[in-house]
Amino acid sequence: MYRKHQLSFLLFILLLLAACTPKTTEPVQTTPPPQTTTPPKPPKPSNLSPCQNWSELANKEEVITWHSLYRDVMKKIRAAEELKDVNPETFDEMYENWKKVFAVAPAADGRRNTHYGDGIKIHDFLASKEQDPQKKDEYIKQVLTLYDEVIRCYGREGFTLGRKAFDLYYKYPTYATDLEKYEMFKRSFDLEEEDAPAFVFNPFTGLLSNLVLDGSVSMEEARSYASRMLALIEANRTKKTPTEWRAEGWDVVAEYTPARLEQLEGVQGFYGCDYYTTKYYPAFENAPTDCDSIVLALSRMQWGGCTGENPKAQAVLAAYRAQCEGPDTTVTCRSLLSQGKYQEAIQCFEERANNAEDSDVKAQNYLIAAKIYYGELKRYASARQYARKALEHRPNWGDPYILIGKLYASSGPLCGSGRGWPSQCVTWPAIDKWQRAKQVDPSVASEANRLIGRYRRYMPSIEDGFQRGIKEGDSFKVECWIQERTKARFIK
């Protein structure tokens, strides 16, 4: 019995010891505490403007509302193309909303230059209506600053600089020198090159021509740009559809730029032998025995530096010797003309006029000198001076009036952009001269009527006159080099 209790006691002790032995436990899984740091912001898209936009503004929704309010009005304005038709109170409210949104988010959403473009349009309009010189100056300077900000915030310097130079040329000419405007157009053209917009060409051409004549731009530089512009006009003529060609203004450029650059034919050395051969040799080929065609081709080719080694120059010279040379003084003057010695030829014809006793001979020689100034040297004021001398000795001769009319009609590119009011008004004094020509000399009536019919369609429209408060028949002075008073007439 005792032994039985002893065994029970030992079993109890063993169980107790087992219960006290430490057990191997599984690792405890714990949930990490939630992150308390803010995750990094995603980077801004690389195509956004570096200038301030509204994306991070605390009052973003309010700013977008200002934007929407002023843009609703601007869209209507752009559709009508007229700010002046907007109710003054509506305009003031629109302007205030623009100023508020521009002050805090000039770059809008960072993708559009809308606020800058609208600001340019608004301040340009305000400048056009402002009578106070100081306020007007502030508005214009704001326009020019906004152009600079567009370049800084959105790039595409070439296009935007071209727009700025365009406004300086046509709207704000006193805010930059001609050379400064020329440099802007030049940089715009260089940056855009094949994509150069049509609006750059005409003012760039006008400045280039004037600055070559006064020596501010070298002939080498001007020749390079003239060649590139003419090549790009032809390239666009090929690749543009007729609709694109007209819509983008290339038709205006094609009328103005070549005609304006042609004026530089009067600068010896500007164009070379190839230019004159390409332009004038075909006329000789079409009329190889006509002295006028022969002299024209020979004189222009020699003016351009074509030497006796040039086969085409040799052909024209041989035709001249066979058809046009003669022993008298007239031919001596003509010989100087055929050699491209234009000033010497003018002096020769003027001496013949001064030494002649017959009034008709005087008039004929003065008119020849006038035609050299017009056709070869492109000096229109001098051409008119000699045509008037011819009329002093033969008042009832229609040819000098025909020539003066042509001088005026050819002045569209000199007096304006080739189209528009300043360029179209030159048709009025031109038609005056042609009408006078057929009145005094019925023998030129056919030529005068042909020219009148051709240029009448280039007169300004009634709408153009209405905008300027000018009615049919009103007295009007044509400025530029012409400086003549005429009567307003419009396309019917």
Image (cartoon, rainbow, N blue to C red):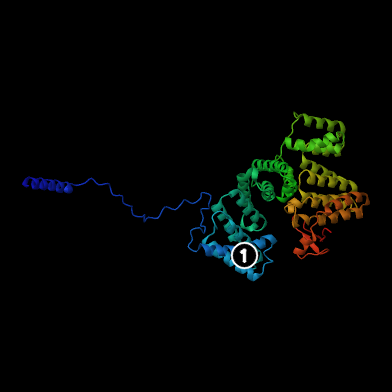
Q: Residue furthest bottom?
A: 89
**Left or right: 12 with respect to 329?**
left
Q: Quadrant of residue 38?
A: bottom left
Q: Residue at x 78, y 46 (%)?
A: 373
Nearest the camera: 410 or 92?
92
Q: Residue furthest right?
A: 442
Nearest the camera: 62 or 213?
62
Q: Residue at x 67, y 46 (%)?
A: 212
Query: Where in the figure is residue 172, as x and y percent of width and height?
Result: 64, 58
Nearest the camera: 21 or 290?
21
Please tell me whether residue 366 is drawn above or below residue 142 in the rendered image.
Answer: above
Q: Residue at x 56, y 50 (%)?
A: 155
Please tell me whether residue 236 is drawn above or below residue 148 in the rendered image.
Answer: above
Label 1 amino acid? Lys
**Left or right: 212 with respect to 317?**
left
Q: Quadrant of the C terminus?
A: bottom right
Q: Residue at x 81, y 47 (%)?
A: 370
Q: Can residue 477 be spotted in the picture?
A: yes
Q: Can residue 256 be spotted in the picture?
A: no
Label 1 packing within 10 angstroms: few (<14), some (14-19), many (20+): some
Query: Where in the figure is residue 135, as x and y percent of width and height?
Result: 60, 66
